Image (tube, rainbow, N blue to C red):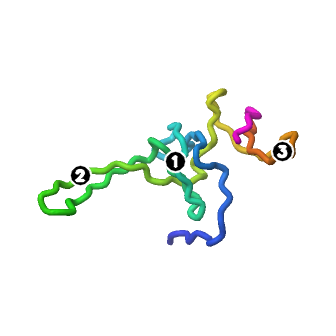
Amino acid sequence: MKHKPSTERQRMHVKKGDTVQVISGSDKGKIGEVLKTVPKESQVVIKGVNIKTKHVKPQQEGESGQIVTFEAPIHSSNVMLFSSKEQTTSRVCYTFTDEGKKVRMLKKTGEIID
């Protein structure tokens, strides 16, 4: 039985534009940028990860069919934020700057993301 996602917005630890590393599944170890987030299903689309191929039939007569490759979404729990400076993955924590602005920070390195 497939899990029915809740209607309220899920809080995700990754945002569009983040650099992440896949920590489980067939693409384990791959590093890429988050292209799109789907908060309702708690999924993310990552550049160069979970590539699927689709055979598209010709739409008009005389036109030839084609094979299209695209990135399919994976669950956000299977990715971890990646620090380009330290070349390591880390969990995310939330902290406040001196000005009182809430920001995301990598726990392992102390690097502020946004």
Quick one: SS at disc 1? strand
> Which kind of residue does numbered mark 3 sit on?
Phe
Please give the residue where the numbered disc 1 appears in the rendered image.
35
Which residue is pictured at 74% across the width and 40% down the height? 105
Please give the residue where the numbered disc 3 appears in the rendered image.
96
Please give the residue where the numbered disc 2 appears in the rendered image.
66
Residue 111 quadrant: top right
Q: CA distance from mark 2 to mark 3?
A: 51 Å
> Which kind of residue does numbered mark 2 sit on?
Gln
**Mark 3 vs mark 1: which is more N-terminal?**
1
The magenta segment is 109-114
Q: Judge the density around disc 3: few (<14), some (14-19), many (≥20) Cα neighbours within 10 Å.
A: few
Q: Judge the density around disc 2: few (<14), some (14-19), many (≥20) Cα neighbours within 10 Å.
A: few
Quadrant (top left/top right/bottom left/bottom right) for the C terminus: top right
Residue 34 place in picture, x, y as percent: 55, 46
Q: Is residue 5 above or below residue 101?
A: below
